Image: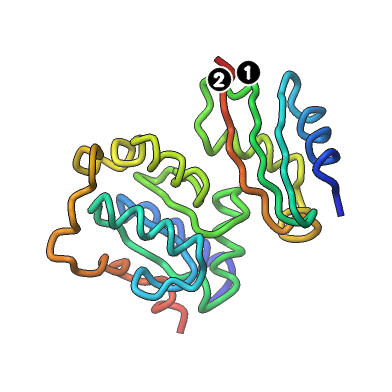
């Protein structure tokens, strides 16, 4: 089971320039906020896909649920 | 019915319905909290939408996710484009973008009560009805 720190570092490694805040109570449900310049100009669906693609195949498995919010840094 | 035929029917349903929600259960009887929340937001906006229950056959969900490249249910589409799942719909509802994106009556202040308070119509040709 991934820790919050592991999820955070994988997101930040997967999206250059991103910062992630990750909270979890049980290491299977994660609340995640990601800020990244790479999101600029993308639809929310595309922003979320950039993050979810990092965990391809794990969502629904080791990671039951990722509640995700994406933001473009101001 | 083959998996390909199911995928074709899903693609047709997305094309033929301006706003369509793929969910667990029905708008009247949602079978999952995320689907229930998404239905409630759409009903608050009084925007008409078609709904497809993915539960009757696991292949509906499998083919939908393959088509949309989106892993979770619910999935809301407008004019053929995936708007998002529950998280995105919630964020857009809360900041007022959802009504605008769906072409609903201006979303400001308390949302008007749904006209006639009737349930949202089911998809004209529910996919599940063609699976038999």
For the N terminus of chain A, which image quadrant? Answer: bottom right
Placement of B123 over or under B128, stated as above or below: above
For residue A12, which quarter of the picture? top right
Viewer-proximal residue, A74 or B125? A74
Image mark 2: chain: A
For residue A62, which quarter of the picture? bottom right
For the C terminus of chain A, which image quadrant? Answer: top right
Image mark 1: chain: A
Looking at the image, residue A21 sits to the left or right of residue A1; the answer is: left
User: Tag 2: Cα neighbours inside 10 Å, few (<14), some, or many (≥20)?
Assistant: few
- SS for callout 2: loop
Mark linked to residue A37? 1
Residue at image position (19%, 58%) is B114
Residue at image position (65%, 31%) is A34
Placement of B122 over or under A38, stated as above or below: below
Looking at the image, residue B27 sits to the left or right of residue B57; the answer is: left
Task: Give the x, y percent position of residue B90.
Answer: 45, 46
The residue pinned by badge 2 equals A40
User: Tag 1: Cα neighbours inside 10 Å, few (<14), some, or many (≥20)?
Assistant: some
Looking at this view, name the residue that lies furthest to the left.
B116
User: What is the CA distance from the residue labelled 1 to the residue labelled 2?
Assistant: 6 Å
Task: Give the x, y percent position of residue B61.
Answer: 57, 65
């Amino acid at each position: 089971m991934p820790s919050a720190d592991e999820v955070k570092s994988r997101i930040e490694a997967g999206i250059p320039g991103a910062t992630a805040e990750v909270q979890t109570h049980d290491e299977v449900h994660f609340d995640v906020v990601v800020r990244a310049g790479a999101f600029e100009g993308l639809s929310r669906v595309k922003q979320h896909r950039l993050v979810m693609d990092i965990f391809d195949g794990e969502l629904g498995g080791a990671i039951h649920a990722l509640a995700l919010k994406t933001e473009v840094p101001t | 019915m083959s998996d390909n035929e199911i995928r074709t029917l899903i693609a047709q349903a997305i094309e033929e319905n301006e706003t369509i929600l793929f969910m667990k259960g029905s708008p009247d009887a949602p079978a999952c909290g995320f689907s229930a929340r998404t239905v409630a937001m759409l009903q608050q906006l009084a925007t008409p939408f078609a709904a497809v229950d993915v539960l009757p056959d696991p292949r509906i969900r499998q083919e939908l996710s393959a088509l949309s490249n989106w892993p979770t249910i619910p999935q809301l589409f407008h004019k053929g484009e995936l708007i998002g799942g529950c998280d995105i719909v919630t964020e857009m509802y809360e900041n007022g973008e959802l009504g605008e994106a769906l072409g609903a009556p201006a979303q400001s202040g308390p949302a008007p009560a749904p006209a006639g308070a009737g349930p949202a119509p089911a998809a004209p040709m529910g996919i599940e009805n063609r699976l038999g």
